[in-house]
Amino acid sequence: MQTIPSSPSEKPVSLWWRPDLVRLPALSWQRRAFRGFIRLLCRCLMRICAEFQVSGLEHYPCQGPALLVINHLGDADAVAVLAALPEFPEAIAKIELRSIALLRWVMDGVGVIYVHRGRPDRRALAVALQALREGRKVILAPEGRQSLTGALEQGTEGAAFLALKAGVPIIPIALTGTENWRVYGNLKRLRRTHITVTVGVPFCLPDLGRGSQALKIGTQYIMEALARLLPYEYRGEYAYVS
């Protein structure tokens, strides 16, 4: 599985097209149990390998659908988020991850919504909408890839589309310290990495109408909400946010 190489200003495009793999995970008891095991494993990893700090969990709604949006810094993002949250949300993940045998086994076990990046993946959007309409929570990274700069990049419009279409609240979740160079470098030195997860106040997008302009404005709302939860050095393209 490959993606078309991109410059810092361009988002990656999946070359592998497998819409047959894009489906909403059934919540069987086996899958629920495996999700519980993975969350426990993530908590253990954070306790052992990191100085882990979580704040804002009082903002996290226990019931009802919601769209969770995160900034994407590195491989440890998923571990940190699953260790922090009180439940396992439906995750939107790039189809390329299936090329890694261990990850394929884990993701097929817990169930994820695969997406083909850089393409009009209507099937992935439809499945995510179905999850929200069934009352589930869906999590994704609006940047569309792991940040190349270590700070926020321009957001893509998928999150705004889902939020506007489903009419669900958005929960911004900001991470710091999960950059690959930082985490893997500290592991080699047997050092713990300071990692933070900050859950922001849920909000809904206003009635922005339809069309591309509505998606652009909605994306701006979402990315600025993430930026406000981050230290200045992590705000990147949204450093102007106060």
Image (cartoon, rainbow, N blue to C red):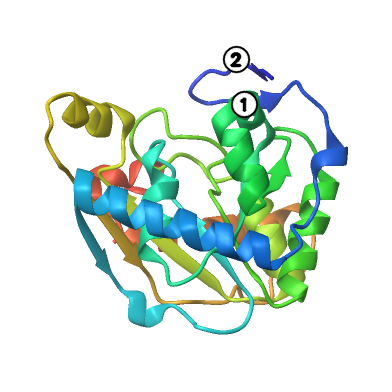
The quadrant the C terminus occupies is bottom left
Residue at 53% x, 43% y is: 143
Give coordinates of residue 175: x percent, y percent: 33, 52
- Report the disc number at residue 12: 1
Give coordinates of residue 52: x percent, y percent: 21, 56
Residue 196 location, quadrant? bottom left
Mark 2 neighbour density, 10 Å: few (under 14) some (14–19) many (20 or more): few
Q: What is the secondary structure assignment of the residue under circle 2?
A: loop
Residue at 36% x, 63% y is: 84
Marks 1/2: CA–CA distance: 6 Å
Q: Is residue 103 above or below residue 37?
A: above
Q: Is residue 136 left or right of residue 211?
A: left
Residue 99 seen in render: yes
Residue type at the position of mark 1: Pro
Residue 226 seen in render: no
Answer whether labels 1 and 2 touch (C-beta < 8 Å). Answer: yes
Q: Is residue 134 left or right of residue 137?
A: right
Give coordinates of residue 217: x percent, y percent: 60, 59
Of 121 and 241, which appears nearest the observer?
121
Residue at 41% x, 28% y is: 148
Q: What is the secondary structure assignment of the residue under circle 1?
A: loop
The quadrant the N terminus occupies is top right
Of 99 and 114, which appears nearest the observer?
99
Give coordinates of residue 6: x percent, y percent: 57, 18
Q: Is residue 180 left or right of residue 72?
A: left
Residue under numbered circle 2: 5
Q: Earlier in the sequence, mark 1 or mark 2?
A: 2
Of 109 and 74, which appears nearest the observer?
109
